[in-house]
Image: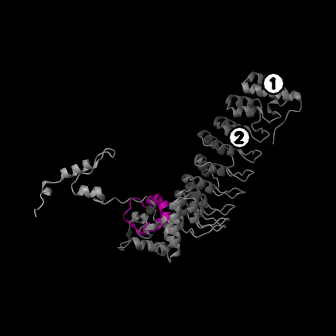
Amino acid sequence: MAGPQPEDRLRTLQVYRLLQAVHRGDQEQITKMAAVGVGGLLNLQEPRDGTAALHLAAAGNDLEMLSFLMSLGSRPDPQDHRGRTPAMLAAEQGHDPALTLLAQNHADMNLLDTEGKGVVFYCVRPTRRHGRCLQVALRHGAEVNGLALDGGSALLLSAHSAPACNATSLTLLERGADPNVANQSTGVSPLMLAAQTGSIQLVRALLQRGGLPGARDAQNQTAVHYAARGGFFEVIQVLCAYGADVGVVSVAGRSALHDAAAVGHAHCCKFLAQRGCNPKQKTSDGVLPRQIAKEAGHKAAAKELRRAERTLGKAGGAGPAAAAPWAVALYDWSNEHQAALLAALPGLPDAVPVDRFLEALAALGAPAGPEQLAAVVAAHDRRRDGVLSLADFLRGGRYVAKAFLLAAYGAKKKKGKKAGGGRAGRSAAAGGPACRCPSARCRPTCCVAATMAARPASWWRRPGP
């Protein structure tokens, strides 16, 4: 792993003098030592850390010194006692000019350190400089799907730091990184890590490139569990649009509803229960999701879970036709692929021929069969003229119950008070002025005098006996 070491005290002292000259940038001294010093001095490494002269120049982004040392015969790939090469140190510091120079001098981009990590791992940082280093390493043949000794990949490392390292993750995906390479020991996938951080951009990118929403870790948890644990409603919605099974139960008997109940996100609880997660599923300790929410003081979530339990207990719930799983799945899919549908049917939001509509759904991979699509067309083409409204289809109200629509998850409007309600309202309706006195100065005589003065003269003319 490490390069040649000095064999005696004389060589050791010369190596340290050489490193000092590199640190000072003293090219004249380096030239003299290379000429009259021990043989192969430029490639010797100090005995404590295994640092070579090229390591120092690369870590300091000293391009002139790098070129000078390699022109004198320094090898571009010395490895210290931790297996790190000058290219790795340059990438770790974000020195893309130094990394480019090393790559142009045929530095090996696929060497591994003692942890099994290549130069790509050292580029995973949330800065533009490290992004440029990644581009350099990949252009010169660095392996994008390499696994470290702990079972992780560079994509897993960047997904763990989402959303700060989203640019790095997207670059890795564009250069062929496998979105389904999971950690060999934990089974955690990049999609799970992206869902855990709520990075909707990375979640979409992974799913669009073939990420499996149903992949499970060593605890039998899916990406839906990770998203529910953080209360990320939009991430759960996108996962369902790509066919995620929300009813998966972990080794401990916990469903995604248990995780959503623990953080008290009522919308997540309602959505998961509607999409097939059993609200009556108990953990291995016999605890319901509603009990978890109640004990944590999440009243809104507990209320939604109680409603879900009652709905599940009723025959048919909200109606077998309205709550058909295929209809809900198609609605979720169409909501996520709305832009693609509009692009496939340009200029026809209100009058789409049925044939073109069905062709677009088939081309985009809609999760519905011929009979189900025929039912959707019948619900929208009521005039039987072979034309339907794409906008109506995207709203989903004609083939999915209102409670399942995403519009049902918005904030409810508060009802306004009726005019004339209350004592003050009745006084205003009768024409009497409301009290405008500050509360500290208001006296009964003040308001009574104002009220009497506002009454018309006819009010005082009472009929005689």
Tell which residue pokes out farthest to the left in this image.
464
Left or right: 282, with 452 as reference point: right
Residue 32, position as x, y percentages in the image:
79, 22
Residue 462, position as x, y percentages in the image:
12, 60
Q: Badge 1 local density, few (<14 within 10 Å), some, or many (20+)?
A: some
| Amino acid type, label 1 | Met
| Image height of 112 relative to 204, above or below | above
Secondary element at image label 1: helix
The secondary structure making up most of the magenta span is helix
Q: Can you say which quadrant of the picture contains the C terminus?
A: bottom left
Magenta residue span: 332-361
| Residue at image mark 1 | 33
* Residue 86 is a magenta residue: no
Tell which residue pokes out farthest to the right in this image.
8
In front here: 317 or 286? Answer: 286
| Residue at image mark 2 | 88
Residue 151, position as x, y percentages in the image:
72, 53
| Image height of 158 relative to 42, above or below | below
| Amino acid type, label 2 | Met
Q: Residue at x 75, y 48 (%)?
A: 116
**Can residue 237 be seen at all in this image of the molecule?**
no
Tell me how far mark 2 sits from mark 1, CA to CA.
Answer: 27 Å
Q: Badge 2 local density, few (<14 within 10 Å), some, or many (20+)?
A: many
Q: Residue at x 43, y 67 (%)?
A: 402
Examine the image and state in which quarter residue 213 appears. bottom right
Q: Can you say which quadrant of the picture contains the N terminus?
A: top right
Colouring chosen for the image of the structure: one colour
Secondary element at image label 2: helix
Tell which residue pokes out farthest to the bottom in this image.
315
